């Protein structure tokens, strides 16, 4: 497909030297014993859970943000009654920014404390992916248990379809968690980790946000059906999970 | 409508000929790279000593 | 060479025929549709090809695939900017409002944001192979997001886009449109191919200077 390109298939010189010197991508034989079982996933989850619980840094960041943002919003809104669509958009903006603050830490901490190499050796990439995604999901659910009621109270939102609200929060959290896990792993290996994570996460999460806001708007009283938006979020989740499953290895292995 | 058509065609003409210039440039760059490659291949080609097997110890000595 | 000739004649013909088509009912300056829509379609095609070449890089680790992926993403982003600008100006002429956040506008802005982030990601990583791996993975996520944004949200958000008016009101519209679309996709392939060749040559020169130093 390359008109005029006459290179023979060159292994780039640098890669050739690296291969010769034995510096390779994590070779398959080393990882053969690495487990990807449920126990491994659970172990990764437990590790993150416990170390997070010791410092509670990410938890505090997310909770504080999730509480402060609705307070700031309700001050600025000054007792006006907002339309459900606006409330839904504000809620998901708050949840998004809280996630951007708190979720990448799960990988940044590994890189900064130097434990990333051990993790690569000890566990198969799938275990790392699902363990950390489960941790992110737990973090999101826990913080939203507090944040969403506070938001509803402060901004005088009327929940007309609570089941839809719960469902969209759950589906949205799944999407947020899995995307944040893969993208967090990517950003942690670059410079300017936090800022880069926000930059690369927002575009990928945009479909999720728009659809979740639409469904939440209906749950907060907007006319219409929530089902089309819920479908879109569900499809997004499935596609993201599949893509993460297939691609995480390329992101994680050096 | 007529003017816009002329402007559009002129713009497209400009883009097209610029693209042809770029292609000429690409060809010359590739020719340059190939020339440098061949030069460096000659400069770094293996000589006789490179391909001889490494000697680990002189043959005369023997372990006692 | 032949490709260049065919390309030149094809697009010139497309432009001329576009101007000769009867105007659409109720819409002003509908000729620009034969440019705006093909640009947008070419942008999406470019991103699909970029993601595909990214997959090929992950599978074969041949840097030419990565160079092609970069080239298609760049040219695609450029086409996308042109499509947004022409669309906005046309909307201003027709409905007196340059931006409305209708479904397609959300879609194209989201897509352009995604590709901006893709370039930011590439420039933030120093190691060559890692840079290419992360680019390929994010290009795949990006095209998924782009597809959601472009095609899925029409079901949710009401759209100004005259999605059916033109096809029904102007006879021969569809043929002219697809003729132009094919022409601009050929242009995309041509320009991205050139960009990829430059990129490959540049990488090769970098390696040669590294190997010789």
Image (cartoon, grey):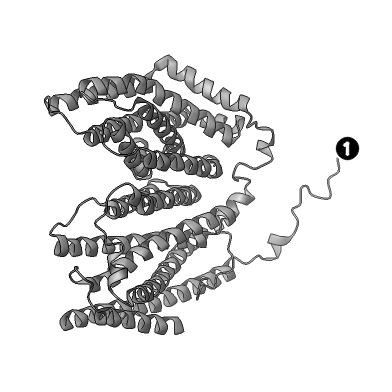
Residue density around tag 1, few if under 14, some if 14–19, many if 20 or more, within 10 Å: few
Q: Residue at x 26, y 23 (%)?
A: A152
Between B60 and B1, which is closer to the camera in this rendering?
B1
Q: Residue at x 24, y 36 (%)?
A: A85
Rendered view: C129 above or below A168: below
Q: Which chain is home to disc 1? A: B
Which corner quadrant of the image does residue A53 belong to? top left
Between A29 and B1, which is closer to the camera in this rendering?
B1
Between B13 and B1, which is closer to the camera in this rendering?
B1
Residue found farthest to the top: A54
Q: Position of residue C154 (x, y in %)?
A: 33, 52
Q: Residue at x 40, y 24 (%)?
A: A141
Relative placement, left or right, of C187 versus C162 is right
Q: Residue at x 70, y 65 (%)?
A: B48
Where does label 1 land, which residue? B64
Between B60 and A131, which is closer to the camera in this rendering?
A131
Relative placement, left or right, of B26 versus A88 is right
Which corner quadrant of the image does residue A203 belong to? top left
Residue A80 visible from this viewpoint: yes
Q: Secondary structure at mark 1?
A: loop
Quadrant where the C terminus of chain A is found in the figure = top right
Residue A200 visible from this viewpoint: no
Q: Position of residue A110 (x, y in %)?
A: 47, 29
């Amino acid at each position: 497909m390359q008109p005029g390109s006459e290179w023979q298939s060159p292994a780039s010189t640098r890669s050739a030297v690296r291969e010769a010197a034995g510096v390779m991508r994590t070779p398959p034989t080393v990882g053969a014993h690495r487990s990807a079982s449920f126990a491994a996933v659970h172990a990764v989850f437990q590790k993150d859970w416990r170390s997070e619980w010791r410092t509670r840094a990410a938890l505090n960041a997310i909770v504080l943000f999730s509480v402060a943002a609705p307070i700031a919003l309700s001050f600025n809104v000054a007792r006006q009654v907002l339309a459900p669509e606006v409330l839904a958009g504000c809620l998901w903006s708050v949840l998004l920014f809280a996630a951007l603050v708190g979720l990448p830490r799960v990988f940044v901490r590994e890189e900064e404390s130097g434990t990333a190499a051990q993790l690569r050796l000890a566990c198969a990439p799938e275990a790392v992916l699902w363990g950390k995604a489960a941790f992110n999901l737990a973090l999101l659910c826990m913080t939203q248990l507090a944040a969403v009621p506070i938001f509803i109270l402060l901004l005088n939102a009327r929940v007309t379809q609570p089941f839809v609200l719960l469902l969209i929060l759950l589906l949205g959290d799944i999407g947020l968690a899995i995307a944040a896990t893969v993208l967090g792993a990517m950003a942690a290996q670059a410079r300017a980790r936090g800022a880069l994570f926000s930059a690369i996460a927002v575009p990928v999460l945009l479909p999720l946000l728009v659809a979740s806001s639409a469904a939440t708007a209906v749950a907060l009283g907007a006319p219409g059906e929530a089902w089309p938006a819920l479908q879109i979020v569900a499809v997004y989740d499935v596609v993201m999970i599949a893509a993460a499953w297939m691609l995480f290895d390329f992101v994680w292995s050096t | 409508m007529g003017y816009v058509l002329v402007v559009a065609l002129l713009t497209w003409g400009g883009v097209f000929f610029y693209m042809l210039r770029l292609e000429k440039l690409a060809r010359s760059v590739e020719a340059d790279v190939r020339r440098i490659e061949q030069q460096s291949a000659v400069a770094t080609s293996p000589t006789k000593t490179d391909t001889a097997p490494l000697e680990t110890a002189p043959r005369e000595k023997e372990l006692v | 060479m032949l490709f260049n000739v065919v390309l030149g004649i094809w697009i010139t013909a497309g432009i001329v025929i576009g101007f000769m088509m009867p105007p659409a009912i109720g819409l002003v300056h509908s000729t620009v549709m034969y440019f705006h829509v093909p640009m947008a379609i070419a942008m999406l095609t470019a991103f699909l090809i970029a993601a595909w070449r990214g997959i090929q890089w992950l599978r074969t680790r041949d840097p030419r695939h990565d160079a092609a992926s970069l080239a298609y993403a760049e040219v695609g982003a450029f086409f996308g900017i042109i499509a947004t600008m022409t669309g906005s100006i046309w909307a201003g002429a027709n409905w007196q409002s340059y931006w409305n956040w209708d479904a397609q506008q959300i879609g194209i802005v989201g897509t352009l944001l995604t590709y901006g982030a893709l370039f930011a990601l590439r420039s933030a990583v120093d190691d060559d192979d890692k840079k290419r791996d992360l680019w390929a993975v994010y290009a795949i996520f990006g095209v998924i997001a782009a597809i959601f944004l472009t095609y899925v949200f029409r079901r949710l958000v009401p759209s100004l886009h005259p999605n059916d008016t033109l096809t029904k009101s102007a006879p021969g519209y569809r043929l002219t449109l697809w003729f132009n679309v094919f022409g601009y996709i050929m242009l995309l392939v041509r320009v991205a191919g050139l960009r990829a060749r430059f990129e490959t040559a540049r990488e090769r020169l970098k390696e040669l200077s590294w190997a010789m130093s």
